Amino acid sequence: MSTWEEPDRRAGALHREAERLATSGQWSTLLERLEAAGLDTVLQDSSLAYRYGEALYHTGRIEDLSAFALRFEESTAPRADGRGLLRALNLGAIAAFELGRIEEARSRSERQLTLADAEDDRDMLARATQNLAAIAGLEGRTEDAVASFELALSTHATLGRVRGVAQVRHNLGNCFRDLGRYDDAQDAYRDAEADFRRLDYPRGVAMATIGRAEATVLAGDTELGVGLAERGVSAARSAGDPGHEAEALRVRARAALATGDREMRSAAARDLAAALRLARSAGNPLIQAEIERDAGRLRIEAGRRRRARGPLRRALARFEKLGAVAEARKLRERLESLV
């Protein structure tokens, strides 16, 4: 056997194992396997590097993902790896968005969109479109976000990317919720949850269940909303995802408040306090802003209007920093009404 065949065979085995673990959603195992192989080895191959970045994302290591995406991008330059650069830009954009660095997310996504178009890479084109749609939704340009998400959904469906379809359906649910189209939101979340269950992806199931719970509460079905919120908390905890557990606790608190029950209001306060601790540990500024906003609402409903100003002001500052124009405007109006 020649000296180069054994390394090639090992690389092939690592590729096959990485694909198998990613397909089955065993992200923690995949992360351990690639870290054992060594990051220098991983970075030599853009497919392995992308899988490693996905594993960081799916296990909630967003700060690590941000640092790795930059290192991945730098590693593509010496070998003029356009495919790798596209994937590094996508990972970097996702990490930047999750960490509240919206202009960085926009810049990376726009570069990704331009390069994907030039390379005729439809997968990365759809992902860049999806990233920019998420930014549009955050900025309150919800109709624009819906149009972009629907374009991305069509491409993911054509390419047979079930996970991409599920993620976009969940994002569309968020948009429909923000537009007050609660029936459409519940349908989108329900479809996303079914897709995630087919993929055996607990983190996605948790996300979709949480979204459906909030849309159900907003639609006025408090009893079902409370039940779905309980399911969402359990699903997020089982998935081991502190960011989505924080979001689930926030939604459960919102559902509890909607009941109008005094004891449920106390439970909501406990959930929001726990949610804020988890969101801080996860480093997600958007979830922190939403929790502070809902904490202010709780204090208003409890008749403690003065004490509502603190969390509402903190939420306003976070939303303004994120560029969430529509939410910031609503909070300013709420604060002015408390004077």
Image (cartoon, grey):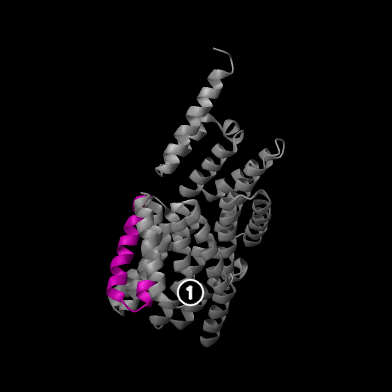
Q: Residue at x 30, y 61 (%)?
A: 231
Question: What is the residue that sits farthest to the top in this orientation?
Answer: 1
Q: Is residue 106 above or below residue 224?
A: above
Q: Is residue 177 above or below residue 130?
A: below
Q: Is residue 119 above or below residue 330?
A: above
Using the rendered image of the protein, determine whether residue 27 is visible from the camera's viewpoint: no
Residue type at the position of mark 1: Asp
* Element under disc 1: helix
Question: Which portion, as a residue range, is magenta?
Answer: 215-239
From the image, tell me which residue sits under label 1.
178
Question: What is the residue that sits farthest to the front in this orientation?
Answer: 158
Q: Toward the viewer: 93 or 273?
A: 93
Q: Toward the viewer: 12 or 66?
A: 12
Using the rendered image of the protein, determine whether residue 47 is visible from the camera's viewpoint: yes
Residue 6 rendering spot, x and y as whole percentages: 53, 19
Q: Quadrant of the N terminus?
A: top right
Residue 74 rendering spot, x and y as whole percentages: 68, 41
Q: Is residue 266 magenta?
A: no
Looking at the rendered structure, the number of numbered marks drawn on it comes to 1
Q: Residue at x 39, y 65 (%)?
A: 189
The image quadrant that residue 299 belongs to is: bottom left
Residue 145 rendering spot, x and y as whole percentages: 55, 68
